[in-house]
Amino acid sequence: MEITFNTPALLFPAISLLLLAYTNRYLALANLIRKLHDEYMRGEKTHHLLQQIKILRIRINMVRQMQALGVFSFLCCVVTMYGVYQQWTHVTSYVFAVSLLSLLVSLFISLLEISQSTKALEWELSDMEELEKTNFFSDLWGKGGDKGEKKEP
């Protein structure tokens, strides 16, 4: 397969959009971390604070890896274009392959980061579900399995 200027140039817009999406994820995580830090400093410690901190640390590292691999893929595309200009046909195909692999790993890490994000949201939902377990009606009829039983005075 012959690689021309157009081959790596096709990846430029895709990689640019991915880097923009990764930067938006990073900024959202940074805002969330700042919000949790403010709550922690005010003494508002939630039930899952340590779990949230652990997952946020993992996610921020994943986003950093995604960004680094995306930038590396972009640089490999630029080197590929320079290789095409210099007519280094053998080296150009390997550098372009490295660019594609880097982009693929970046996307795979993005998938894992989304999985971590979903896990954190599940914990938030579980907190709200516990609120539902203790409400006016469950307190009215008593807690536990005594729904049909009468309470003695």
Image (tube, rainbow, N blue to C red):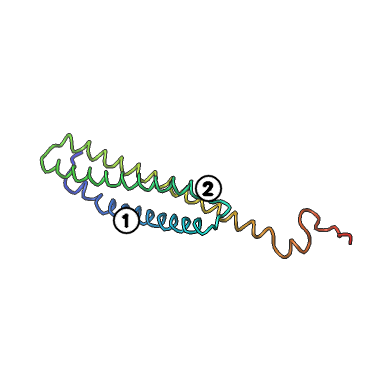
Question: Closer to the camera, 8 or 34?
Answer: 34
User: Mark 2 sits on what residue?
Assistant: 51
User: Mark 1 sits on what residue?
Assistant: 20
Is residue 141 toward the left or the right of residue 86 in the image?
Answer: right
* Quadrant of image for the N terminus: top left
Estimate how packed mark 2 is, as few (under 14), some (14 to 19) or many (20 or more) residues with alpha carbons within 10 Å. Answer: few
Question: Closer to the camera, 46 or 126?
Answer: 46
Which numbered marker is on residue 76? none
Q: Residue furthest top?
A: 90
Residue 59 to residue 137: above or below? above
Amino acid type shown at disc 2: Gln
Estimate how packed mark 1 is, as few (under 14), some (14 to 19) or many (20 or more) residues with alpha carbons within 10 Å. Answer: few
Q: Residue furthest right?
A: 153
Amino acid type shown at disc 1: Leu
Q: Do the residues labelled 1 and 2 touch (CB within 8 Å)?
A: no
Name the secondary structure under disc 2: helix
Question: Closer to the camera, 39 or 119?
Answer: 39
Is residue 54 toward the left or the right of residue 105 in the image?
Answer: right
Sequence-wise first label, 1 or 2: 1
Please state the horizontal and vertical placement of residue 42, each as a whole percent of the image. 51, 59
Residue 80 to residue 34: above or below? above
Q: Which residue is drawn at 89% across and 62% down?
A: 153
Please state the horizontal and vertical placement of residue 81, each as a whole percent of the image. 16, 45
